[in-house]
Amino acid sequence: RILDLLFDIEKFSENKNTSELVSKPLVAVISYIKENIESVHSVKEICDAMKISRAYLTGLFRLEIGCTPYEYLIHQKLEHSVHLLNSGKNVTEACFASGFNSCSVYIEAFKKRFSTTPYQYMKASKSRKM
């Protein structure tokens, strides 16, 4: 999936300048999302904060990353929640600290992305650490 590839690129490029991979406006948006992952709940909030139109933002994402801004936002929230689960947070804490407003929405998105529930993931993660 394209989002998995993007995540791999982000990991690979941690020591490189992100602007070498995508345009400056998209770098600014991605930085904003990452810095505000807990408080950003919608693409509209991103557009308002960055003072750009939804159509422009969607075009940037589709052209340069191959997904919608919403898909990217959810992807980042889920990756953040995995980090939190791995660090010992429970499902509810990971849900809200990742910026989801509802545990049911979080669990559904997590299961769709990872083919397991956050609780099952957390249990498996704990057993791997022992």
Image (cartoon, rainbow, N blue to C red):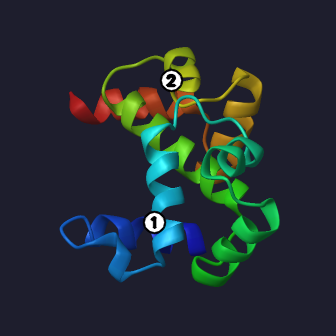
Q: Determine whether 41 is above or below 56 in the image.
A: above
Residue furthest to the right in view is: 55
Say which residue appears at 74% left-offset and 37% top-offset. 108
Please tell me which of labels 2 and 1 falls first in the chain.
1
Q: Which residue is mark 1?
A: 27
Q: Which mark is residue 121?
A: none
Is 60 or 48 nearer to us in this picture?
Answer: 48
Circle 1 sits in a helix, a strand or a loop, which is it?
helix
Left or right: residue 114 versus residue 42 is left
Q: Quadrant of residue 39?
A: top right
- The quarter holding residue 95 reads top right
The image shows residue 130 at horizontal and vertical percentages of 21, 27
Name the residue tied to disc 2: 97
The number of callouts visible is 2
Mark 1 crowdedness (10 Å alpha carbons): few <14, some 14-19, many ≥20: some
Q: Who's the residue at 34% across and 71% down the image?
A: 18
Q: Does 76 appear above or below 3?
A: above
Packing grade of label 2 (10 A; few <14, some 14-19, many >=20) is some
- Of residues 63 and 109, which is closer to you in this image? 63
Residue 20: image location, x then y, percent: 34, 82
Q: Amino acid at mark 2?
A: Ala
Residue 2 lies left or right of residue 111; in this view the side is: left
